[in-house]
Every structure is written in C-alpha cells, then in structure tokens.
Image (cartoon, rainbow, N blue to C red):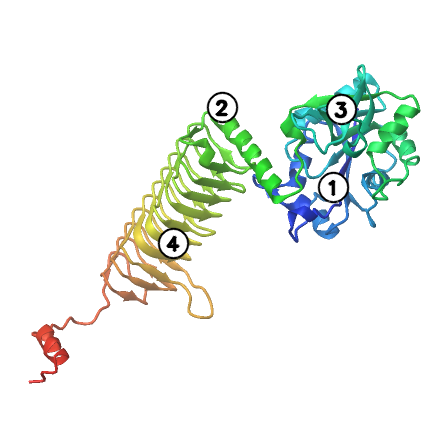
Amino acid sequence: MSVGVIVLAAGKGTRMKSDLAKVLHTAAGRTLLEWTFSALADIDVREVCVVVGHQADAVTAACDPAIRTTLQEPQHGTGHAATVGLGGLDGHEGPILIVPGDMPLIRATSLASLVEHHVSEDAAATILSVELDDPTGYGRIIRAGDTVSAIVEERDATDEQRRVTEVNTSVYVFDGPLLAGALDQITPDNDQGEYYLTDVIGVLRADGHVVQAVAVDAEEGIGVNSQAQLAEVGAVLRTRINTALLDDGVWMLDPSRVYVDADVHVEPGARLMPDVYLEGATSIGAMAEVGPGVRLIDTTVGAGATIQHAVAIASTIGDDASVGPFAYLRPGATLLKGSKVGTYVEVKGSEIGEGSKVPHLSYIGDATIGSGSNIGAGTITVNYDGFAKHRTVIGDNVRIGSDTMLVAPVTVGDNAFTGAGSVVTDDVPEGALAVERATQKNVEGYAEKRRRRAEGDDS
C-alpha cells in the first residue's frame, strides 16, 4: 500500500546556536534532511510533503524538485505542522507517515517495519518507540495490553508512569482520514499555547480506535537539537559506514580514525590508514592504499594507487599512481596510470600522463604532460599573465630540468630536454634541448673582500 509522508522541517533549532536551519546541518556527508529521505528507501511512497518554516527557501532548495514543500507560518506546534503537511498531500487517504527531519539514525528497515505493522494490524495509529535506561524528559508510552492507551509527557506523568522506560520518538503512521478528523479536535490548551501531535493519540483512543507501538533500537530515537547531539549522531553514522565497509572486505588499521561520508564508494581490498577523510562522491579502487593523513573530496582513486599526507579535490588518480607525501591536487587534476605526484607538489587543472613523474617541489597548473616524462624539482608552469590563464603542453619522454620556469602558452615536444634553471618562453622542438641562463662568472677572493669590508678594512 502506498504511503503519504509528512516530514517536519520547520523548526529553527535554537539550541544549535547557528544561522543555518537545523535540518540543513550535515552528519557523515548528508544533511539531516537527506538522511530522513534516505530512510524512506524501503517504503512504497506515494508522495512526500516537507513542512518548512525557518529558512523556508533554503530548506526547499535542498529538496528534490519532485518533493513538495508547504509553509508553516506562523508555527503553532507539531499538531499544526501535521495539519499543514496534510494540506500538501492532495487528500491522500492511505497511511500517513510523519517523521521529524532531524532524526538521521532511523533505519530504512525500521520505517518499513513500522508501516508494515500498521497496515497488518489495521491500526488507527502506530508509534515508533524506543526503550531508554533514562527516559527523563520524554513522553512515556502507556500500554494497555498489546495496545497503547496514551502518550504522557514528563510534566504530566505520575510517579508510576515516570518509571516507564518506553518512550515516544515522534515518528508515527496514521490512518489518513482518521488523522485529519483527530487534528480537527485537538486544542492549544497547554502552557505553550500550541497544537501537539501527541494529543491526536488521546483523541483516537477516546473514539475507540486501536493505537499500536513498535519498538526499535534506542539509538534510532536520537534527535538532533544541539551541536553536541549532531556530533553524537555523526559518530554513530560513521561507525555504521565503517562497519559495513569492513564487512565488505575493506581494511582499516584503526576504524575510529577513518572518516567516510555516506556516498563514498570503497572497493573491497582497499586499505585505509588512520586520519583519512573521504568526502562527497569519492571512490576508492581495489588494493589502493590511502593514508595516513589524507583528505579526498569528490575524487576518484584507481586500483593499486597510493596516497599519503595529501589533499585532493575533484581530481582523478589513476591505477597504480602515487601521490604524496604532502601533495595538493586541486580541481581538474588527472593522474594517469602509474604516474607520480610527489612531495610538496601542487597540481591544478592538469593531466599527468601515464608513467610520468613530478617528484617534488613543483607547481603544475593548466598543463598537459605526456607519458614517460620527468619534471625536475622546482619546476613551475607559469600559467597566469596577470589577466588570463594559459596552457603548457609537455610531450612524451620529456626531461624538464630542475628549477625550470615554463611560461605559458608554451609547448615542449616529445623527447625534448630543458636545462636546469631555464626560463622557457618559446616552444621547444621535438628532441631539442632548451637552455636559457646567463654565463656564470666567478669572482675570485670575494669572501675575503666581504670579510675585510665588514671589519672596516678597505685596503
């Protein structure tokens, strides 16, 4: 049976102490809102409506265009938000799943089981609950046999009810028409003057309808209301990700020091050393060794490549290529098979050909390097003339001498050489040697003259 989904995402998140809407904060590479959407993966969803409020435009922009948003303004509580959300579902009369947008630890399997239980039991409402060792501050699930008789908030609970450890997570499935009718009956007669969604449970029970609850692991009920809680759920998500990778055959020396975003792909057999950060759409090939001390963002790493103490952004590192230590690959850097970018080398918008090497202390920007070439230490492609960027082309099997300045636009032909310390401003023909330097002059006795001058002896 298809389900209508209401995602509650209107809150400001005052305790986050941030200008960013709470649901747009990220954990393990996804916003809290994106984690909510991913938890719907195992459900036959007819339509999703996200209730927005604080920073409504930004939250709407973060949603897929196929997802409808509706504005809750002003905000009069969760019951009011549910009413606004229902208005955005075009009169859906099947089950309605209501889920907060700030609970990234809910598993897709748990939501699917919740919906399945609700449908099979033909309940008016089914609540997702958790058991907590310390339930202080949470609404208690009060049961009458196999059904729920009420949700009692902490401030309203008796001493006996406060001893109940099963609590409400604020995730529900409702019968659509019954929810609409119950929302019409709740009132804002409380300290906050708001409409509470939990009051719907009492209305349904008073009308003789069955309310169920399904318990899941306690960690799934953790919501994010502060930066500390955001860090807490981020740690849980990373542990889940790393555990799945280990189960798939990825090796990690110390999983607690490996940080992998949710959308990263790592092939079995890859090796991840400590202090590795894999972010965005990064992909790691089989038998690649990454780390220690590596940050990769939207970067593809081929099979058998090695990277250590390096940063790469929107780059491609080919099979068996080598990067680092202390290298920086900026967007558009492409290393073909077996190439090397070594110590204190920066590469931007350039292709390093198969088997070519840039071993150390160089800047390669807006360049194309063929195969089998070697770039000497201290080489710089001078790509910017103060107004525009220009390209350097280096052919196959070229030997660039140390401390060469290649002033773009310039082309160095196949099998050519440049002399150390040269400033190359003109194209170098295939197989030629380009040398640009002044004739060396040695001044005999210069050191002694300097010493005498310093001592005031000009004789």
Which labelled disc corresponds to residue 346?
4
* Separation (CA) of disc 2 from disc 1: 35 Å
Q: Position of residue 91 (x, y in %)?
A: 88, 35
* Separation (CA) of disc 4 from disc 3: 53 Å
Choose between 109 and 281: the one closer to the eye.
109
Residue at 24 percent of width and 68 percent of height:
436
| Residue 145 drawn above or below residue 170 | above
Q: Position of residue 315 (x, y in %)?
A: 46, 47
Mark 3 element type: helix
Amino acid of disc 1: Ala
Question: Nearer the viewer's eye, disc 2 or disc 1?
Answer: 2
Mark 1 element type: loop
Mark 4 element type: strand
Q: Earlier in the sequence, mark 3 or mark 2?
A: 3
Question: Nearer the viewer's eye, disc 1 or disc 4?
Answer: 4
Q: Is residue 175 left or right of residue 216?
A: right
Question: Nearer the viewer's eye, disc 3 or disc 1?
Answer: 3
* Separation (CA) of disc 1 from disc 4: 41 Å
Choose between 85 and 1: the one closer to the eye.
85
Choose between 445 and 418: the one closer to the eye.
445
* Separation (CA) of disc 3 from disc 2: 29 Å
Q: Which residue is mark 1?
A: 66
Q: Is residue 239 left or right of residue 166?
A: left
Q: Are marks 4 and 3 in contact (CB under 8 Å)?
A: no
Q: Which residue is mark 2?
A: 247
Mark 2 element type: helix
Question: Nearer the viewer's eye, disc 4 or disc 3?
Answer: 3
Q: Which picture quadrant has residue 449?
A: bottom left
